Image (tube, helix red, strand yellow):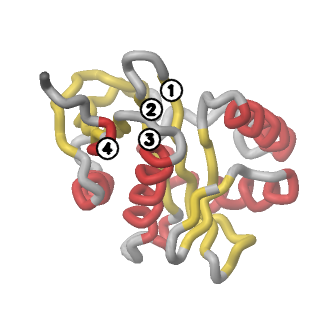
Amino acid sequence: MIETERLIVRLPEMPDVPQIVRYYRDNRARLQPFSPTFAPDFLEEATWAEQVRVRSREYAMGESFRGFLFARSAPQEILGNLNLTQVHRGAFQSCMLGYNLAGGEQGKGYMTEAVAGAVAFVFGTWKLHRVAANYMPHNTRSAAVLRRCGFQVEGRASAYLLINGRWEDHVLTAIANPALQVPVP
């Protein structure tokens, strides 16, 4: 679990399944242009019940943290999601960050708060060196969140991800853990 001043970011639990389906149903039109095409069973409770089990197992194995955002003031209502995936150890010590937020919750600083909390978790708890996050060039809100949280633009990748049925360019960003910098001899 990741806790911030106003948010709890945690793995989903079985009682959350109806709320998860509602979150995606209510926000589908807004999220789909920035997401891989949703599978036909994406809005089925059975799909999300399985995801609860998968996400718990992945977290226990140190492979990912794929959670949902809840306001402390309304801990049963999903505001968005935040995923830390592609966790690599060894010489890389890195992971990927992805997120989305309900349309009605934008402009309140929730995602900036959640991303800052996630970075603190990755650096403090997982002790990783680097968090990468990528966004489509026209996604100015995501660009602003990452900039506020200290991510630096590292480049641009053409036709990087298959998003909503099209290969989309992405801006590549990352932040490094200052506590894990290796001094030059």
Q: How many marks?
A: 4
Disc with the residue nearer the chain's start (3 vs 1): 1
Tell me the quadrant of the picture where the C terminus can be found.
top left
User: Label 3 sits on what residue type?
Assistant: Leu
Mark identifier at residue 97: 3
**Foreground label between 2 and 3:** 2
What residue is shown with label 4? 179
Disc with the residue nearer the chain's start (1 vs 2): 1
Question: At numbered mark 4, what does the secondary structure look like: helix, strand or loop?
Answer: helix
Residue shown at 32% from the left, 23% from the top: 160
Q: Position of residue 99 (x, y in %)?
A: 47, 49
Q: CA distance from mark 1 to mark 4?
A: 21 Å
User: Label 2 sits on what residue type?
Assistant: Cys
Question: At numbered mark 3, what does the secondary structure look like: helix, strand or loop?
Answer: strand
Tell me, yes or no, whether the two marked residues, 1 and 4, touch with CB atoms within 8 Å: no
Q: CA distance from mark 2 to mark 3?
A: 7 Å
Quarter holding residue 53: top right
User: Is 54 placed left or right of 147 in the picture?
Assistant: right
Identify the residue at the far bottom of this view. 73
Q: Residues within 10 Å of mark 4 (few under 14, many from 20)?
A: few
Disc with the residue nearer the chain's start (3 vs 4): 3
What residue is shown with label 2? 95
Tell me, yes or no, whether the two marked residues, 2 and 3, touch with CB atoms within 8 Å: yes
What residue is shown with label 1? 86
Q: CA distance from mark 3 to mark 4?
A: 19 Å
Quarter holding residue 24: bottom right
Q: CA distance from mark 1 to mark 2?
A: 5 Å
